[in-house]
Image: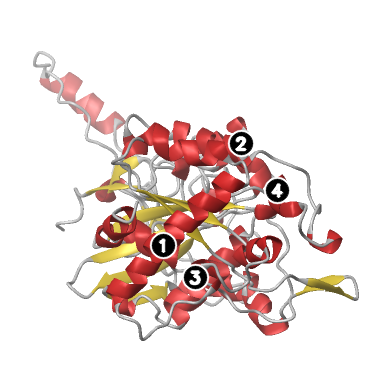
Amino acid sequence: MTLIRKRVSCPYCDAVVFLGDCPIVATNREDDAGQFGAQFGADLPAGGDGGTAGTPGDWERYPVLWRPAPPKPAAVVPPPPKNFLVRLMETLASIPEEEEPDEYEVVRPVSSFGFPWKELPTRACVRCGTPLPDEIGDRQILKIGIVGTTGAGKSHFLAALIKEAAHQQGLRKWGIAEFELVETSSEMYRERYESFWHDRRVLEPNLPADAPEVVFRPLIVRATYLRGTKVLLYFYDIDGESLANRGRRARYASYLRRPHGLIFLIDPMMIDAIRTHLAPGESGYHRYIRQGDLVNACVADLEADRARRTPIAIALSKSDLVATAAGRQHSFTFSRPATASDPIDSVAAEMAHIHREVREVLGAAGERDLLAVADRLGPGAPLTFHAVAPIGYAPQHEDGVRVAPEIKPLRCLDPLIALISPWVRDQIRSGL
């Protein structure tokens, strides 16, 4: 009962709600058939204010099992006493002809074969209708936005990050004892990302956020620090075209207004000084977008002075191509993988060196606006620079499909470590 009046922030629409006000919905639903139509929850809000998951169909997809009783009406002053006969007639007129159904009775769904089935109940946001994570009252929610233009490698980066952090437990040495996808996100990861590892097929770009077939859900990770702190990490990734448009960004990426961390992936293919040194097959596969404009726009979207307090990691993506273009495949520190057996002090020192390398690369390539972000936020802003390679090798075309000859992710955990570990951020910035 201690959670009933607990205030939480919805990770989908950012609404601050009381858990006790949120209805309980069935999440074990049938996807094909519309067994649960609009009659379930039809009197509840249909969607939020354009949040990432607050779509008008949410209340229809998740039948309401229970909802809190409406507030009691305010007490009214009784009228003057009436005589006995008037009171008797009013009492007889108020008796219902038949018993009315309970407005808040529990709906018991059944399968298409008529058998009852487990509802897998959970609370849903009272504003956008999206089911909330089971542990929302017990764990702090940390929202991590992954931002980049189309083709920057956001999906590949997220796939590599989850594989290294969750499947290989690569964050344990950094004080995180548990890092695992919640079950629903694990299913989504298998459907969306596993083909990348098994077939080496390059993932298709994200569909536009406003496409009718898109139902956006972030990847949710359950993490527990060795000291006992428990969190839920939400990783958000939508298409670059939506991120680059202010109106669509406000509608579909509301998480960018109050994130707990941002990772900007900078595509070297959008940097002229790098692209001109690459083979024709490795360049020019999508239109040019000024990446500094996107970074500045997202930083400007942060509420109040949150921009100066939000940890930000600017990561040069596809660092293997950067090393190839510079003719320095082995001389860059970011071209060498971090060794799992190295002590964390030496790894943090490497990250500090990479911080300086990336700033030098961006400066030499003429990307002054990206460097100016750090200057505009001020010397105390928690902003760090990194270099990652989610694939590690340039994809090749085989039978009309882009396939990686080998998949060897490089330093994809570094940006996340810098976001969630203030000590590492301080170590990196001390090397300036």
Instruction: Write down the residue under mark 4.
Output: 273
Could you tell me the amino acid type at mark 4? Ala
Q: Nearer the viewer, mark 4 or mark 3?
A: 4
Q: Which residue is mark 3?
A: 411
Query: What residue is at 74 percent from the left and 80 percent from the top?
Result: 405
* Residue 288 in sight here: yes
Q: Which quadrant of the view contains residue 226? A: bottom left
Residue 221 image offset from top left, x and y in percent: 41, 68
Of helix, strand and loop, which one carries label 4?
Answer: helix
**For marks 2 and 3 on the same chain, the one whose residue lies earlier in the sequence:** 2
Return the disc, 1 or 4, that comes first in the chain's sequence. Answer: 4
The kind of residue tagged 2 is: Arg
Q: Nearer the viewer, residue 257 or 261?
A: 261
Q: Which mark is residue 353?
A: 1
**Residue plotted at (34% across, 29% down):** 304
Front position in the image: 275 or 216: 275
Outermost residue to the left: 81
Q: CA distance from mark 1 to mark 3?
A: 13 Å
Give the amino acid at mark 1: His
Tell me which label, 2 or 4, sits earlier in the chain: 2
Residue type at the position of mark 3: Arg
Mark 2 vs mark 3, foreground winner is 3
Asked whether residue 29 appears in the rendered view, the answer is no
| Figure disc tally | 4
The mark that comes first in sequence, 4 or 3, is 4
What is the C-alpha distance between the residues marked 1 and 4? 22 Å
Q: Residue furthest top?
A: 80
Q: Secondary structure at mark 2?
A: helix
Residue under the point 58% across and 74% down: 330
| Residue occupied by mark 2 | 248
How many residues crowd mark 2 within 10 Å: few (<14), some (14–19), many (20+)?
some
Mark 1, Cα crowd under 10 Å, few <14 / some 14-19 / many 20+, is: many
